[in-house]
Image (cartoon, rainbow, N blue to C red):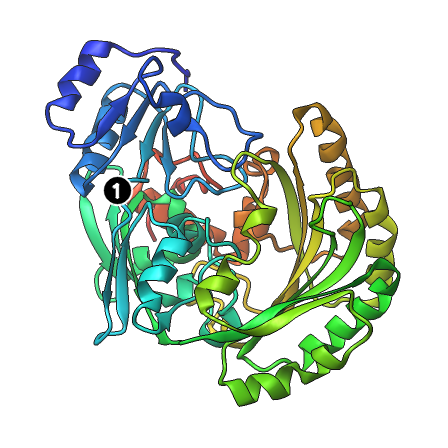
Amino acid sequence: MARPESIDVQRVRALEKTFSGELLLPDAPGYDEARQIYNGLIDKRPVVIARARVTADAAAAISFARENDLEISIRGGGHGVAGRAVGDGALMIDLSHMKQVIVDPDAGTAVAGGGATWGEFNDATAEHALATTGGIVSTTGIAGLTLGGGLGWLMGKHGLAADNLVSVELVTADGDVRNVSAQNQPDLFWALRGAGANFGVATALEYRLHPLEQVTGGLAAYPFDAARDVLAFYRDFTAEAPDELTVYAGLIHAPDGSGMPLAAILACHAGDASQAEADLKPLLDFGSPALVQIGPMPYPAINSMLNEAYPKGSLNYWKASFVDDVSDDLIQTLIEVFPSCPSPMTGILLEHVHGAVTRVGVRETAVQHREPSYNLMVASVWMDPSVTDSNIRWTKETYATLEPYFLNRRYLNYLSEDEISQAAGASYGPEYEGIAHLKAKYDPENVFHMNLNVEPAANGDR
């Protein structure tokens, strides 16, 4: 599809008559700010930005884009590292003004607009001592994270964000507004939980909530020369972890600007205080940490603990895959590759997947990550554009060195822009064919393709 640099202004003015939000052309005040997303590596110029305020705005924008042969990108929280929220010459549907969170404490549910972030969601649910699995950082948008599966601090006890999804208000390619749930269009609901960006604009999402007043967690950091012992301890510690305890580990740099490499373990325990004390004791007794900050805190606090490590406008290039074990050989390789890292903001992280996540059947949702494993992420972050090439090169070389340890599974929310068109098979796995048939049913012309795209099956719905 051609990417126009401009559009007939009169057509946009005609749309304004029925559009309750803002329509921003490239010369409009606020356009440059609206097109910016969290990853500063992405610099694209939509032909028009449709900042929706209500669901009808999203439907009108889809119709307008199709009538004018425009590609459609969708911005929820704008945090996706691949930058598919914005496209050159596309119409960007911007949901950032649709972020109201309505909590029903009696039902144990919450409905949030598709532009809400996890920070906004968590603040609203915490007022009722309730929570659900969200992202690792609170600036992440709820919609993108959930539709892609949704790893998070509470996943050991409560499953993925997608596992806690109750319903979705979805605007499909034909402009219809569908209320999708396990009872209403269950085939589409299956696909939304893991491959959702392929099927429409999620203008509202309803979640199941769980009682949670506080968690016990935080970070323990160790000198880099202890990294081998730290990662070996992490492997053994996670092998026995109860559902309530979700634990990550990483090779990181000190946040004081010194660039000093460290080994770190990050934990979140969602059980009661006495159980948390017992389960975390091995960690608190381990080694000679340079820093320990682990204790009781509100859930929103742990969900925002890493926010400063991923500031808006930073340049990000990530690569990630799953491993089934943190072997001695893998540990040695991680220790060898990390010191050459060119940015003091970069880390290599291991995210343990266990518990409730693994008790959901692999066929129950479009998410294939249902076995105990670790998601290994090389998360390169830097601020100076002049060192972009060296950071991307190091990330690719490091990933290639680690590749012999990887399973053929990728978490789609961590894919970078140059991988997004090639990794669908590894991200969707055996569910790819089923997703493709549903794509033919609900979006046969592949209107929503600026994502980790699954093309419609040639023979339509099964």
Instruction: Give percent across and percent down for residue 439.
Output: 36, 45
Q: Quadrant of the N terminus?
A: top left
Seen from the viewer's position, the closer of residues 319 and 41 is 41
Q: Residue at (66%, 45%) from the top-left corner?
A: 319
What secondary structure is found at the residue carrying circle 1? loop
Res. 455 visible in picture: yes
Instruction: Give percent across and percent down for residue 394.
Output: 78, 37
Instruction: Give percent across and percent down for residue 25.
Output: 31, 17
Instruction: Give percent across and percent down for residue 171.
Output: 24, 43
Q: Is residue 240 left or right of residue 173?
A: right
Res. 359 visible in picture: no
Q: Is residue 289 left or right of residue 272?
A: right
Seen from the viewer's position, the closer of residues 459 and 356 is 356
Seen from the viewer's position, the closer of residues 140 and 75 is 140
Quadrant of residue 397 in the image? top right
Which amino acid, mark 1?
Thr
Quadrant of residue 460 in the image? top left
Q: Mark 1: few, some, or many residues within 10 Å (few <14, many ≥20)?
A: many
Is 224 located above or below residue 425 in the figure?
A: below
Q: Residue at (14%, 17%) from the top-left corner?
A: 14
Q: Residue at (46%, 68%) from the top-left corner?
A: 299
Q: Is residue 451 left or right of residue 216?
A: left
- Count of numbered circles on the image: 1
Quadrant of residue 249 in the image? bottom right
**Mark 1 = which residue?**
172
Q: Residue at (58%, 72%) from the top-left corner?
A: 217
